[in-house]
Image (cartoon, rainbow, N blue to C red):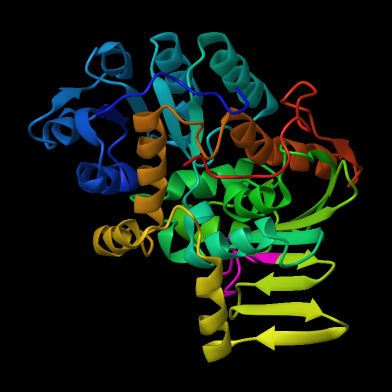
Amino acid sequence: MLQFRAEPIPDVGVGLVGLGRRGTEAVSRLPKVPGCHLAAVCDVRPEAAAAASGVSAYTDYRALCEDPAVDLVYICTDWGHHVPIALYAMDCGKHVAIEVPSAQTLDECWALVKASERTRRHCTILENCCYDSFELTALEMARRGAFGQLVHAEGAYHHNLENRWGPDNMGWRLELNRSQRGDLYPTHGLGPVCQALGIHRGDRLATLVSMDTAPFNGPRFLREQTGSEPAGFQNGDLTMTMIRTQKGRTILLQHDVMTPRPYDRGYQLVGTAGFAQKYPSERVCLSADGAERVYEGDELASLLPGYRSPILTPSIEALSKTVGGHDGMDFLMDYRVIYCLNHGLPLDMDVYDLAEWCCVTELSRISLENGSRPVEVPDFTSGAWNIIDGFSYAL
């Protein structure tokens, strides 16, 4: 599925499964994306499905996948149902877009890869952080060689979720932290840096090692929510994963949803001739003729427009700000999926991206449970990771 091109679909019929918070946001956003229409929705709650007026409403995802009006199945359910729905959709001849994390185990990652290859249907990950304005610009700088040769990158998901753990909100996610060890939510931090490094486009993730703290706040949160003792709480407050690529570059990935640390995706690119950082403040350092120059504030604001992402035409950027969704990231993510389907182009993120970014969840657990030993990352491309040289947008 590398650089796979499907038959163009001039007006993509979207079938959305799962009308929780993310699904409801997508229902309001997708009708504003050029080149598509909302054809059907599905939720196990009949009242939720019926609330989306003017489209076909289902309570069984299989019926939506079988609907001939649906070209793309857009999956926003709980994490445990992502893969079964995606597999059934591809077998029904539909393209698939899956919210993060799209898969949680190696078996799930391989199942999606094999189904996409067998059915010749797109299976993409809905990773909105790849469309953040700074990360888009830093990616373009990397593509043009502004940082020299990239040698290291960092990404993270630092997001205090204490006020979201209630039983009527995200209690299910706290339960996952109780029962599972490892980086449960790797793709926000990993996705954008993998694009900059050209992962499976000239390089690949080869080996990882994980280390975690003991669980300190997690058991307390669970005790406060349930009133019972959280015996055997698994997920450490902070999980750190170091990844080495086939070409000898490194990635530091972190996961922390338990401490009061301010929101931070840890985005950094480190090259032989430059550096970019998004948090806690945006900075770029460029080196030329033995001299380094740090760009911040107004100087950075003057530098970045010269590296405008090719997907950000003035009209699309303006529309993204109008429609919104994480400052336009959600709209741009949807827009790119639909644009590529409209024109029969390869998607920005293919099934191999999905598998490589999501497999860190189980691989980090395996490393932790074996005393932080190195773990090999599977080659989901079956040897084709170096056929393409670097990430690029299909235009």
Going by the image, does 213 lie left or right of 67? right
Instruction: State the extent of the magenta-drawn residues as a range.
Output: 257-268
Of 20 and 151, the residue lying toward us? 151
Q: Quadrant of residue 265?
A: bottom right
Can you give x and y, in whole percent of width and height, for residue 215 in the image? 70, 58
Q: Residue at x 56, y 67 (%)?
A: 307
- Quadrant of the frame with the N terminus: top right
Of 369 and 373, the residue lying toward us? 373
Q: Quadrant of residue 320?
A: bottom left
Residue 256 versus residue 247 in the image, above or below: below
Can you give x and y, in whole percent of width and height, for residue 261 in the image? 60, 74
Q: Is residue 263 visible?
A: no
Q: Is residue 369 visible?
A: yes
Going by the image, does 267 lie left or right of 202? left
Going by the image, does 59 lie left or right of 283? left
Of 105 and 273, the residue lying toward us? 273
Residue lying furthest front in this view? 289
Q: Residue at x 46, y 51 (%)?
A: 128
Residue 27 versus residue 291 in the image, above or below: above
Q: Is residue 263 magenta?
A: yes
The main secondary structure of the magenta stretch is loop
Residue lying furthest bottom in this view? 298
Can you give x and y, in whole percent of width and height, for residue 79 in the image? 48, 35
Q: Is residue 78 magenta?
A: no
Can you give x and y, in whole percent of width and height, for residue 282 in the image? 59, 78
Residue 113 versus residue 54 in the image, above or below: above
Going by the image, does 114 lie left or right of 292? left
Q: How many marks?
A: 0
Q: Residue at x 28, y 49 (%)?
A: 25
Q: Residue at x 53, y 35 (%)?
A: 102
